[in-house]
Image (cartoon, helix red, strand yellow):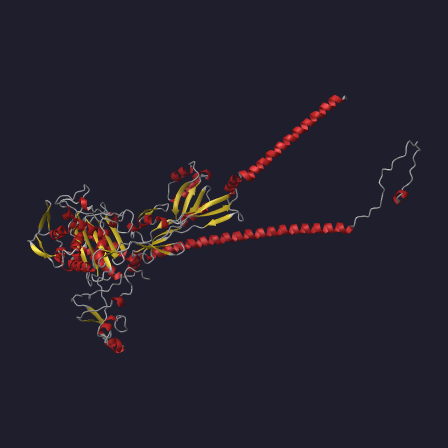
Amino acid sequence: MSPAPRSGLARSRRRRLWGLLLALCLLFVGVVARVADLQMVTQERYIAYGQAQRVRSEVLPASRGSVLDRYGTELVLSVPATTVWADPQRVTDPATAASALAPLLDVDEPWLRDRFSRTTRFEYLGRQIDEDTATQIATLGLDGVHLRAEPTRVHPSGGLARTVLGSADIDGHGVSGIELQFDELLTGTPGQVMFERSLNGGVAIPVGEHQVEPPERGHDVLLTVDASLQHLAEEVLAEWVDEVGAEGASMIVSVPGTGEVLAMVNLDTDSATGEVGPAGYNQGVVDTFAPGSVLKLVTVAASLEEGYSSPLRQVQVPDQIEVAGSLFNDHTPHPTEDWSVSRILVDSSNVGTIKLGQELGPETLHHYLESFGFGGPTGLGFPGESSGLLRPVDDWHGSDIGGVVIGTGVSVTAAQVLAAYNVVANDGVYVPLRLVDAHVDGAGVRHQVPHVEPRRVVSERTSGQLSAMLSEVVSDGTGGRASVPGYDVAGKTGTAWKRLEDGSFGEEGNRQYMATFVGFAPAADPRVSVIVVVDQPRLNYSGGAAAAPAFSRVTEHALRLLDVPPHRGTDDDDGEPILVSVSNPPAEHTRVRAPVVIDPDAGDTALAGEPRDR
Amino acid sequence: MSPLTALAPARRTAPRPRTEPRPETRPPLRLVEPPERRSRLRFGVVGTVLALTMAIGIFALAAAHTLVVQAQFELDRVDQRVAERQGDLEALRLEVARLESPAAITAAAGELGLVTPPDRVHLEPVLSSPVAADTDAANASSDEHAASAGSRPGSTAR
């Protein structure tokens, strides 16, 4: 063998060896680079990818808070329920699954088969079903059909206070009423559970990663409403609406001293069936109406407060008056007479009130209307609450002042009128209405709901004079049917034309009316105030006939529930007070004519407006 | 010459012509002490101990793992029971709320034959009760005070 070929072969081998070495080095560098990439550059992505494959996360739904009445009775609460859903891609036998589930979920089989045939990975089959049904479905063990917890909203008291409580949708979001107003508080914070699972069956690995972030329950909302009184008020008003053949009615019961709303009722008559049932919304706060004569209180109050009048001041009152070309009449003809300011209010004279209003002038009237709370929110903060319509004084023209003082030139809500009359009950202080007292968080800590501070509107003296006049309205005036046996009641009737759909008040003969009565009792120490607004009473449209009796019935119940003792003896058939003597055993009722003195502190230990333990 | 060399059998080789003297390349031989059995034994013992320790450690780890798994299962069972009790609690809350509702109370009262009284009768304190006067002279000395003492024994029918 010659040396030359051997040398070439050696060189070739050497080159190949070097090439192999280089390739191995490059491969090694590539591997190192990839390892560096996996470990240092993109490690987060791969960690996440790995976790996504083996770690499963499930949302733990938070229970929505309850809504309770002033004594802690739950009016709305969330209870556990189960939602059934399907992953259509994993349903192996849609026909069998559909036939098995249809009777349990009370749905049609074709509907289920349609759900199973979809290309999505999530389809609801039934939401918030009861636990028994959920258990039956679970025992079926259907592939691709899953269950998960989803609380549902329940009203254990049925339709009680539904227009106040409102509602939440199926996803637990408030859509109306208190549910909407306090949606943020009521809604809890969902929790989360993370666990490692096997890749094939998705079964949790016992010693794998397991993290639980528990859900936080929403706050409970405590209303000022008394469920018992609410129930009574709903029953009484429903009977009354049926009795007078009205289209509907609203009623609000409050504690004047604190502004707490004890009951809020809104009813409608079904035009098809004639049945009286809950209205669709809180009309007493949302709907506006022309208040009529109940607004005369403001004019008389302003006249007294500004020093133009005293209760006994005599005013010449004809039965009609012309204001800027418009003629205003009293409801019954009478000769021109000197009437006291008190009588003007007691007999609800339009002419007399207009004369008092003209003395005050538009600016002063407007100021007092605003001070009494008209044209602004009541402080309830209720969703959809109306401020009513009180035009700026610059927009008052011609005969507007006449319409305003007798309550036809403004629009108000029932809540505004009640708050205005509470001024008189509160010795001249405006106390904003309150529907919600507090909310309680998951730890049981009570948070008081802030409310608007009271403000003085008229002096105590003026308030006392107005209270006496309003008492006379019930004892000798238009509100006689609002009286409550055993108590002095103060209040005012109101009758006003209802605005028709075309915006007009209609013509004589086809007019529609809103009958109102608002007042409080006992007159000397008001513990409860009530407004009743009856929409289109058919039999008798005056406030004294169509609204006052309902006021009387509900106020009597309210005084009983609030443990308010009568201020004078209860009259029996003989008109004599009944007293009880223990000196004549066995205990017999002894009838004596004597002034009865009752110590309110001894007879009534629970202050109105303060929650009592049951 | 070492002793081993001296003991080796003599080689018989054909005589060769000596060209040059052969260099002495072989290292001198010496006696080597046989390895000590004790050190080998020590190595075996250490190895065995290590192996045993490792085996025991693995078994202990497995045992601990088993205990953890059992505890996890127990925890899951407890969680399940808590969830069931929580569900029971919620159901009972709902039942309480239903029973406390005014409509339910009214219905229950109706079933018991209770009715709303048509008239209200108030039992009111008597001002000139002889029992009250005899009982507490101090209170009887003040009509005003006696009138206001509605809760005083004997002043109100029960």
Is A564 placed above or below A418 here? below
Horizontally, is A368 left or right of A88 in the view?
A: left
Horizontally, is A388 left or right of A62 in the view?
A: left
Instruction: Write down the quadrant of residue A474 in the picture.
Output: bottom left
Residue A384, x across and y down, in percent: 28, 46
Quarter of the image where the C terminus of chain A is located: bottom left
Quarter of the image where the N terminus of chain A is located: top right
Is A159 placed above or below A199 here? below
Residue at image location 79% in from the left, 50% down from the top: B36
Horizontally, is A109 left or right of A227 in the view?
A: right
Residue A539, x across and y down, in percent: 16, 51
Residue A346, x across and y down, in percent: 14, 57
Q: Farthest residue in the left direction?
A: A335
Q: Is residue A443 visible?
A: yes
Horizontally, is A95 left or right of B107 in the view?
A: right
Q: Decide which of B1, B113 is in the foreground and name it.
A: B1
Q: Decide which of A3, A365 is in the foreground and name it.
A: A365
Residue A484, x across and y down, in percent: 19, 60
Count the numbered circles shown: 0
